Amino acid sequence: MNRLEQRLENFGAEKIFVAVFIIFGVIILFMRPPYQLMDEINHFPRAWQISEGIFLSPTMTIREFKDAGNFQSKKIFCLDGAPADALDDKIYIAEIPVSFLPDAFVVDANERHYVHGFSADDVKNFLATPLNSDVREPIQIPNTGVYPPPTYLPQAVAAFIGRALNLNAGIIFYLMGLSGLIFVAACVYWSMKFLPEAKPLIFLLAMLPMFLIEAASTSADAVTFGVCLLGTAWLLSLRNSTESFSRAELFGLIILSIMLACAKSVYGTILLLYFLIPRERFKKFWALGAAILLVNLILTLAWSWLSIELTGAKLYTNYYLGFTETNTAAQKIFATEHPTAFFAAMINSLISYSFLYLGNFIGSWGFLLNVNLPAMFCVLYTILIIFFALTNGLKLNLNDRVVLIFAAVVSTVAFFFVHYLKWTPVGNEYIRGVQGRYFIPIAPMIFFALSMLPPMRHKNLIALAAGIFSGESMLLANFFAFY
């Protein structure tokens, strides 16, 4: 170990890693034009709505939205392709102050998806715009109105504080993004503390441009990514003790079960890592494991009933964009009659779209995922992560690896199946709508399971250099796309 490596270790490599994460996160937060991240124009209104205590999103039929004159707005997401028989379906909406929608950078989502010639003056003007919360505009949020309130907890708290202090609209917007970044940074930091041997690997995963950009945003992915990373690291760390569970640990298991149910139900499989914990740590070990899984399932079903059945809202699918060949009910029947067709379509998609998924996993953003990093960067950074995964230093037995991979595979099958039903034409050989960033929450389980080689020398320094290079590449890609 050379002198620089020794200093880094003595000071606390996790502190340096998180500082780098926050620095690049703050830069990209102010450098990326607002609402130019996939679905952020729908995530922000949901977070604002929750900050006002509106936990169940109101609904409005597409026809009512049109008749109210909102259909012609060029500032918001609109279901202008909805077929005639869907016009009376209820869709979630949110009302937000128009001060959050300046014409300088909020554009028609159906025509122009990212800003050309964005400038620092646009940010300055936004920061100086008074909130004026009484002047509002309704926005359709068909794909985010179903999200539970805890999914936006950091951003909603920031919005509440900003509104209470009567801050300007732009200040509140960036404060919400900053709150998400700080929340995720805390999750990254404690993940490293729980698994100190895997610090470099965790840092490289956190410095994925896609991970960092989502963290520094008003998107629900910020909380999802942070909770999944922290939950995975914490559950794995519980393997290293044989002492009886403390009250704090029991409370933590309950909170994790709740947060995973709120983040995205498909990632609840992370709770399966509980079964890697030594049995002697709790007398009723199996009963406790069943209980935390049951809590997760019950909360998922209860919120689904409240937000969908109770409100009468329709889940957002390709059908509302005019892709009438997509039919969820018919797809369910087809899947029942042809049970192997889904798995064939999933395998076809994984093979055919592997580089597309990889590009989105490493870093692809903009409203149509049209802000990309060079293919060579994506390949090299993936190879580097795999190398760090192989040498991450976690001591795992075969059972540990099997559980980690099994949990990740179940989540993968789950989100492919959801998109098979909601976004894919009946009987199609490929599954539509799956994005590479969906793999980020389960990536730690996959990469932790690969640990099998001795730790490399100078791993902290190499990881630090690679993370900084990744952050710089992200900023350059963003600059050339928007400025």
Image (cartoon, rainbow, N blue to C red):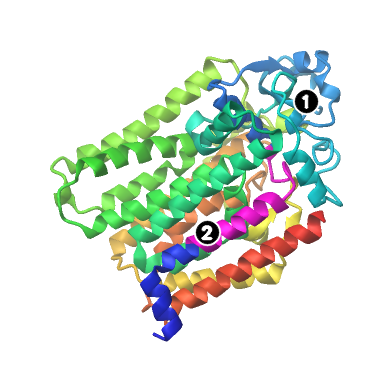
Disc 1 + disc 2, Cβ < 8 Å: no
**Mark 2: secondary structure:** helix
**Mark 1: secondary structure:** loop
Magenta span main SS: helix
Q: Is residue 268 visible?
A: yes
Give the residue at mark 2.
206
Quadrant placement of the N terminus:
bottom left
Instruction: Tell me which amino acid carries mark 2.
Output: Ala
Q: Residue at x 70, y 61 (%)?
A: 475
- Residue 231's place in the image compared with 80, above or below, is below
Task: Give the left or right position of residue 10, taking residue 52 as reference.
Answer: left
- Residue 26's place in the image compared with 386, above or below, is above
Q: Residues within 10 Å of mark 2 (few under 14, many from 20)?
A: many
Residue 33: x %, y % from top left = 75, 47
Q: Residue at x 46, y 34 (%)?
A: 262
Whichever of callouts 1 and 2 sits on the residue coming sooner in the sequence is 1
The image's mark for residue 411 is: none
Q: Is residue 423 visible?
A: no
* Magenta-highlighted residues: 18-40
Residue 298: x %, y % from top left = 38, 28
Instruction: Tell me which amino acid carries mark 1.
Output: Ala
Give the residue at mark 1.
82
